[in-house]
Amino acid sequence: MIGIALLGTGRMAHVYGPKIGAHPGLDLVRVYNHRPEGAARAAAMYGGTPSDDLSATLADPAVDAVVIATPTATHLDYIDAAARAGKAIYCEKPLDGTLERTERCRAVLDAHPVPFMLGFNRRFDPENARLRAAVRAGEIGALTFLMSWSREPAPPPLDYVKSSGGYFVDATIHDIDLLCWIAGEWPHEVQAAGSCLFDPGIGALGDVDATMTTLKFPSGALAHVNNSRHCAYGFDQRLEAFGRDGMLQTLNRRDDDLVRWSGRATEARAPLKHFFLERYDESFSAALDAFHDALVAGEAPEPSAEDGHRALGIALACAESVRTGRTIALG
Amino acid sequence: MIGIALLGTGRMAHVYGPKIGAHPGLDLVRVYNHRPEGAARAAAMYGGTPSDDLSATLADPAVDAVVIATPTATHLDYIDAAARAGKAIYCEKPLDGTLERTERCRAVLDAHPVPFMLGFNRRFDPENARLRAAVRAGEIGALTFLMSWSREPAPPPLDYVKSSGGYFVDATIHDIDLLCWIAGEWPHEVQAAGSCLFDPGIGALGDVDATMTTLKFPSGALAHVNNSRHCAYGFDQRLEAFGRDGMLQTLNRRDDDLVRWSGRATEARAPLKHFFLERYDESFSAALDAFHDALVAGEAPEPSAEDGHRALGIALACAESVRTGRTIALG
Amino acid sequence: MIGIALLGTGRMAHVYGPKIGAHPGLDLVRVYNHRPEGAARAAAMYGGTPSDDLSATLADPAVDAVVIATPTATHLDYIDAAARAGKAIYCEKPLDGTLERTERCRAVLDAHPVPFMLGFNRRFDPENARLRAAVRAGEIGALTFLMSWSREPAPPPLDYVKSSGGYFVDATIHDIDLLCWIAGEWPHEVQAAGSCLFDPGIGALGDVDATMTTLKFPSGALAHVNNSRHCAYGFDQRLEAFGRDGMLQTLNRRDDDLVRWSGRATEARAPLKHFFLERYDESFSAALDAFHDALVAGEAPEPSAEDGHRALGIALACAESVRTGRTIALG
Amino acid sequence: MIGIALLGTGRMAHVYGPKIGAHPGLDLVRVYNHRPEGAARAAAMYGGTPSDDLSATLADPAVDAVVIATPTATHLDYIDAAARAGKAIYCEKPLDGTLERTERCRAVLDAHPVPFMLGFNRRFDPENARLRAAVRAGEIGALTFLMSWSREPAPPPLDYVKSSGGYFVDATIHDIDLLCWIAGEWPHEVQAAGSCLFDPGIGALGDVDATMTTLKFPSGALAHVNNSRHCAYGFDQRLEAFGRDGMLQTLNRRDDDLVRWSGRATEARAPLKHFFLERYDESFSAALDAFHDALVAGEAPEPSAEDGHRALGIALACAESVRTGRTIALG
């Protein structure tokens, strides 16, 4: 059993807490929040000893690893503390919203090389993983195009948008990670376009809520991402990989799979899973499995801090492309 | 050019008239109806010389063939006259509603062996024909099951039902012909069940408006037909052929092929083509093509009078099975 | 926690054993087999105390309920013993292969009214349950047709066939239960046709391996079942419910949901889940959940012994229909 | 009847010739080619009087309109001559490969305002037209994204590539026209990326064979196009329109619509229609219908010369974007 301290008690902690508690190989030893009442509430729900003392939490020899599910701006501090304490780290994405702090984060991990895994959970969705495996096995030959759709049901509150790092850093970063992981290479050029079509408040913050992004890879393969903060029919999540010998697509997920025929519509399907908690629920479990299995096997977990660093660089370049109207070259 | 006399001016004549007129190899020479005003109206619409004189029509040397699109009960008389006059015959299905008269019809054709084709148009639907070709080419191996769905949008007027010969003779006969043609054999046993679920007036006439039929073939293959006089989403027409090595299915047809996603339904498709005139329009043209081509090539057209005779026998056995609660053996 | 004694160590015990062990509300207290080494092997795999002593097993006060997963012919004896011992009973389907013994079984349960649930697991498949819920909620109006496809990947060994009670009792009984449960009524007439197309050994035993069955319900609704002991593309499991206002269909399940396009085929999907253990795995868990929940709530679990008795009567009538060529009336 | 002179005897003339000949409202009066033997061959195939004398052809009072199906570089000359002769003009796309000559062409048409229609045939595909009509009718609300896939089965000969004006002018121009026509507005910004992945000879000519293009419209709507000179499964042609209230998609077309199930793949469909002659055959007929109907009604046909001019400007901006790595602003 791997002893876990869960840091954070917000939305993402609520995703991970029950899954850690139910995992046969993980033991939820401690639940940390800087406010004692938050820690107590989380412990009551998920188990583990509540604590508002980070040092004591990390000093506990029963704690083998931390799961960081705190606000993005605090990730670096917790990674720093956990790495110095020699604990393995699972950190919710993104590493951070700025390249400079992300680099510091990587330096900390270089100095204190504990096992580290970044929570790009979509890699662990079974169909996404199968598509990648089929691509890497050569099922469709050399890649020509990759495409990713990610359309959210409704814009988030403006407070969330303010601290999100912008739409590309908040959302497109998932598609970027997924596409680069499938392609097996990093893009050297990126261009993006964005509009504010749904919430004028988002525009007032200088952000966008509908974007199209193009990545160009050294192999010549091209990738497209479209993101929307609004989608009338649920959380639209699709991948398409087009290669020299064929194409692979993933399908959307629904609450039910019945096919409905009526005088209004035929072969109609239910609306899509509402949002990421519903759509990707099992991927969070699978991500924890992968973290557990890597620790047990003594192997480096993936996605790595480098993956997070690179994906952030690309997401920031997308924003720069919108701002400057230029194709951005990546190092 | 093959000179055609079109007999009849009702609904089916309205299907064939324009198609004969537009056919590059057919010449609509005469339009016959026993009432002069009917003939005149039809000729005004489709071309050809109107006539209410059958003898004169059949004596016209410019008439090479007749297309019989009159009420079912009159088919035999027209076949008799046309065969005696040495004209090739295309006759709308069914040959007749009784086995005894159908046998007389076949005797007439044996005595006067003119080219004869029965209008089982669904064989000429491109997808039905492709499914059969794939089955006969062995694409799915030896047949296990054949299934046919035929569900009509709404019950016909009771006057039509009265003279229809019953639901099996009126409608199931199409599925029977299609399935036997695909199977390449005639069933030796049939069982059927029927209900009156939509129009009590149909029940009052002793007829049914929802049926399920099972055919058993000498090879051991089994076939299922379901027919309904009501269908909320249009004219549902499907075939499924299941064999030792796989399965083939045809798809329904719609007025448009757009895929629609909304908050109510996703991947929704339009309602189906309304009824047989819309769904099978091109099959009537293809049937006339086949009639034309057989005449030009000097080959016997198909479906034959024997096909019609056998299909009628099976349809009547279905009705008998419902009446007696027995599996009916076929000669 | 409800203490469970698992009776039997064969294929179905292997389905239930791990699921009981993993269930948060069930405690696998004892594992019984009449041979001590079988019981020991099962206990080593699933947990619980092994036992070859039925009386001791049923006398154990920690045992609240038995799960009977023994050969069909022994179900009655175990039900008898468990009911007399006052234990709740979950019994794998069918109750028995003969109506006479099934009636005795019901008499035992009438005399010793312990909670009893029959393992018609397909009711607990999420999509089957959703289709039924939608039908019962009136989503498609009054039922016209119900259809069920159940095609198995390959014929079972002849030893299995010999003790199976025949194809209708072994397999069609599942479709019958499902369709009657959806319809909310019992058929009053049944007719069936069968062939031996895949394994001549099955025919030599007087059994069939490809069948079509028609059920007629008092409401006038008709149902069709097709069963095959061979299916080239996996375990084909479909339901179609056609009502006055529309239609509902369930979809097949696959090992992966990728859509594949190549020069040979487009929009191609993976072969189907291989057989019932793969296809219906979660339904067995859901059935145990329902058993647990009914015991906790003090409610009568379903499917009941009457459901099993009636379904057996219908399955035997199917076989009689094939044998006699008659529509069989049901009491 | 509208008298037509068909100019040109190459591939596109071979598309239009038979369709003009078969059209009930068009009369193929003359077939012109600058070489007498070409004209004679075409006249033998499609009808009409052959001619290698342009002046005589245009002076013929029986000629009401010309259909220009000559090489792109000659379009302007023929438009000039026909306009001066007062003939209505249907011209195969593109107007020309350079903006300067296209502007001259528009000046000619301004000076000699004959009815003019440009052959952007994809607008006349029934499903494309239905998608546009649904978008314009507000079925999916305000547009967020438009997407167009156009992937060709195989790269053209290098001689064709040399005179094609580049991949964006040759192919993407179709998607651009379609998307602007659906959007009902012209983009003000465009960015594009391209690679040479299939034929190094295309790269040696400075052209690309795989591209992704993003258009940004004044409304804020964004559009994506992906084009490939190679596609293993046929001519992939899809549209997706995503709006505030839902989404609409068109489907690909196949030689047959059977659904195939086997041990290798389930629900598999046939490969796609091979290329544009097969896929868009009926759209060329519908385009001629529209030309005919506009002339008869005395209305200005569409797509107009301005449409062609604007689409060319956007296509050239795409190429410039690839060359310069900049987002290109459009006037």
Image (spheres, coloured by chain):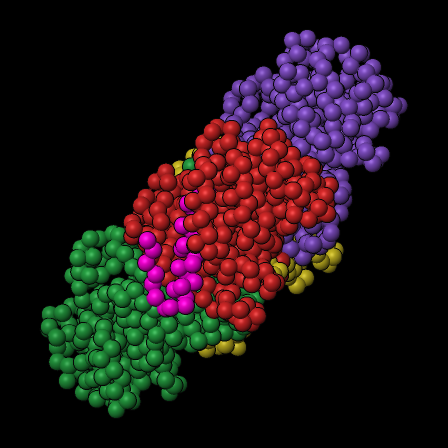
Chain colours: A green, B purple, C yellow, D red
Pick the front one: A291 or A153: A153
Residue B315 on the magenta segment: no
> In the figure, is residue A177 to the left or right of D31?
left
Q: Decide: is B33 above or below C196.
A: above
**Residue D65 position within the rendered picture, expressed as x and y whole percent measured from the top left:** 56, 35
Q: Quadrant of residue A254?
A: bottom left
Pick the front one: C264 or D301: D301
**Residue A44 position within the rendered picture, expressed as x and y whole percent measured from the top left:** 18, 69
> In the figure, is residue C35 to the left or right of C6?
right
Main secondary structure type of the part rendered in magenta: helix
**Residue B270 position within the rendered picture, expressed as x and y whole percent measured from the top left:** 46, 40
> In the figure, is residue D190 to the left or right of D13?
left
Q: Identify the residue at image location x=79%, y=20%.
A: B63
Pick the front one: A22 or C21: A22
Q: Which residues are magenta?
A: D302-331
Q: Identify the residue at image location x=51%, y=23%.
A: B199
Q: Identify the residue at image location x=61%, y=54%.
A: D274
Q: Decide: is D325 above or below D46.
A: below
Q: Decide: is C298 above or below B297.
A: below
User: Do we see residue B227 in this rendering?
Assistant: no
User: Do we see residue D1 in this rendering?
Assistant: yes
Q: Quadrant of residue A263?
A: top left
Pick the front one: D210 or A119: D210
Q: Identify the residue at image location x=39%, y=52%.
A: D146
Return the residue found at the far bottom: A111
Return the residue found at the far left: A36
> In the figure, is residue A146 to the left or right of B16?
left
Residue D309 on the magenta segment: yes
Q: How many marks?
A: 0
**Residue A122 position within the rendered picture, expressed as x and y whole percent measured from the top left:** 36, 68
In the rendered image, the quadrant that contains the N terminus of chain D is top right
